[in-house]
Image (cartoon, rainbow, N blue to C red):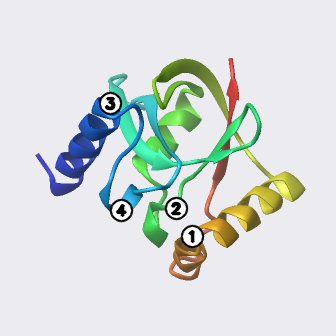
Amino acid sequence: MSDVNDWNRQVIEEFRANGGHVGGAFAGAPLLLLHTTGARSGAERVNPMMYQDLGGPLAVFASKAGAPSDPDWYRNLVAHPEVTVEVGAATGPYLARLASGEERERIWAKQKQDYPQFAEYETKTDRQIPVVVLDPA
């Protein structure tokens, strides 16, 4: 098992054991578990990630810490936009869509203001970091 998968597994276990709260790098940050369907494999994948509450819809960010390529989970939800999200103790279905234009800029600007590491990620890559809105299904 890779270090990333092992780290994700530990965060997922802590999230579920503590009603959505974790320590370490995510301590105090809004965290969710995103369930996607593998674009090629069709297998379920679960990834912990920070989110922004949009008052019903949620936004997540395909930053991959500023890597030159999009994260696998992003490619999965582009192929299969029907996702499941765990927030706190609640789990529900959502439909993913890519934010664009003013909507994307507004959400992205707030994320960078609230969590400056996202502004740093942006400086590390030439790609535009996708902002994904998860609408309750």
Q: Upstream in the sequence, badge 4 or badge 3?
A: 3
Q: Upstream in the sequence, badge 1 or badge 2?
A: 2
> Is label 2 in contact with label 4 (beta carbons under 8 Å)?
no
Residue behind mark 3: 16
Q: Which of 135 and 19 is in front in this view?
A: 19
Q: Where is residue 23 in the image (x, y as percent from the top left)?
A: 32, 54
> Is label 1 in contact with label 2 (beta carbons under 8 Å)?
yes
Q: Nearer the viewer, residue 3 or 92?
A: 92
Q: Is residue 61 left or right of residue 8?
A: right
Residue behind mark 4: 25
- Would you call the spot at circle 1 few (<14 residues within 10 Å), some (14-19), or many (20 or more)? many
Question: Is residue 67 in sight in this rendering?
Answer: no
> Is label 1 in contact with label 3 (beta carbons under 8 Å)?
no
Label 1 – label 3 distance at C-alpha: 25 Å
Callout 4: helix, strand or loop?
helix
Q: Look at 80% across and 62% down and name the residue there.
A: 105
Q: Upstream in the sequence, badge 3 or badge 2?
A: 3
Q: Upstream in the sequence, badge 1 or badge 3?
A: 3
Label 2 – label 4 distance at C-alpha: 15 Å
Label 3 – label 2 distance at C-alpha: 24 Å
Q: Upstream in the sequence, badge 1 or badge 4?
A: 4
Q: Position of residue 22 (x, y in %)?
A: 35, 47
Which quarter of the picture shows residue 20? Answer: top left
Q: Which mark is residue 63?
A: 2
Q: Nearer the viewer, residue 80 or 86?
A: 86
Which quarter of the picture shows residue 133? Answer: top right
